[in-house]
Image (spheres, helix red, strand yellow):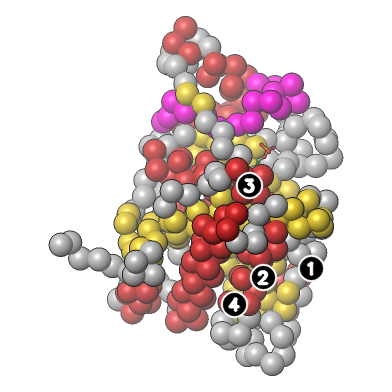
Amino acid sequence: MSKRISLTRYLVEQQRVDGLIPGQLRLLLEVVARACKRISFEVNKGALGDAMGSAGSENVQGEVQKKLDIIANEVLIEANEWGGHLAAMASEEMEGIYIVPNRYPQGEYLLMFDPLDGSSNIDVNVSIGTIFSVLEKPQDHPGVTEGDFLQAGAKQVAAGYCIFGPQTTLVLTVGDGVSMFTLDREQGSFVLTQENVRIPEDTKEFSINMSNMRHWDPAIKRYIDECLAGEDGPRGKNFNMRWIASMVADIHRILSRGGIFMYPWDKREPNKPGKLRLMYEANPMGWLIEQAGGAASNGKQRILDVQPTQLHERVSVIMGSKNEVERVAQYYAELNEQPSA
Ligand code: AHG
Ligand code: MN
Ligand code: MN
């Protein structure tokens, strides 16, 4: 039997052998993985548990909260607040930051998460996930503020997601490539199943919500029109389309076999830069994609270079196979358009 490497062993080796992660960050990642395992079990209970349906409340962004959005948020907070590795947390489901209570020691890291991504898929038994991003707390002042979180994605020290699909898979980067760990339910542990994930630079598969086509700006419309024209069009090849409406699932497919994922700015709400959130979705996914050899852009700028100005900031997202993302950026440049990102 081939050697099985657990997430714990992988992280210990990253710390000890490769010196890539400090001990506190290793602990943090272990705790996040444990929380994801808990969430996975709640997800799997489905209608047998009490996790389906609406919670009857709205989050700070005016979106209806599902029970599982709230459960996942609580699981992540409870798991992470007492270990001494964190200074504070921020979540898509909470208006302000959550500072580690005084009764626990304060650590040096900041954790951000989208506790449950793909909420509209919970009740229809389609893949969903948890996305997370880790920053270092600036050390130039005591205590922790919301401003400490407003760091560009390039400053992340760890990022990943856990997808709850036919398998539960944790996908992680600490800046040394992307690794995947599959949950072994019999052993109760994540096991390394893929290292050094690479995204092909070219693709024949795109991922966008086509129902928004009439609202897109010309660069996106041109790119998709050319894909749809297939062999007879300027691209000279046929394209396939996939849209799961869970970013985790669409990005997981792209990390597995390539493709381009887009949730661009559109005219529905012109003052909103996009639908997806910079801190909880675009930054962690953008870094994973880059670490796997892909690219992540908002049409005019690398996503990881966007300087956030607020916690719940949104952004236009174009990420995946490098050559396709660069092509879309090129179309924006050619049209001399500025997507308001
Ligand atoms: P969330 O469930 O965390 O609010 O995120 C949903 C996001 C993302 O996962 C997905 O790509 C997108 O919203 C789907 O949006 P549409 O329903 O507009 O297609
Ligand atoms: Mn989400
Ligand atoms: Mn969410």
Question: For the residue carrying disc 3, how many other residues have a C-alpha within 10 Å: few (<14), some (14-19), or many (20+)?
Answer: some
Query: Can you give x and y, in whole percent of width and height, for residue 75 in the image?
Result: 61, 71
Q: How far apart are marks 4 and 3 (CA)?
A: 27 Å
* Between discs 3 and 1, the one toward the N terminus: 1
Residue on which disc 1 sits: 96
Residue farthest along the left direction in this orientation: 1
Query: Can you give x and y, in whole percent of width and height, for residue 72 in the image?
Result: 63, 64
Residue on which disc 2 sits: 74
Give the left or right position of residue 132, taking residue 65 as reference.
left
Query: Can you give x and y, in whole percent of width and height, for residue 324 in the image?
Result: 50, 31
The residue sitting at 70% across, 59% down in the picture is 67
Can residue 306 be seen in the rendering of this structure?
no
306 up-or-down from 112: above or below = above
The residue sitting at 47% across, 28% down in the picture is 205
Can residue 116 be seen in the rendering of this structure?
yes
Q: Distance between the residues labelled 4 and 2?
A: 10 Å
Asked if the magenta segment contains residue 204, the reply would be yes
Question: For the residue carrying disc 2, how many other residues have a C-alpha within 10 Å: few (<14), some (14-19), or many (20+)?
Answer: some
Amino acid type, label 1: Gly
Circles 1 and 4: CB atoms closer than 8 Å: no
Give the left or right position of residue 15, taking residue 37 as reference.
left
Residue farthest along the top direction in this orientation: 232
Nearer the viewer's eye, disc 3 or disc 1?
A: 3
Residue on which disc 3 sits: 123
Which residues lie in the magenta part?
202-221
- Nearer to me, 193 or 173: 193
Q: Quadrant of residue 26?
A: bottom left
Q: In which quarter of the image is residue 338?
A: top right
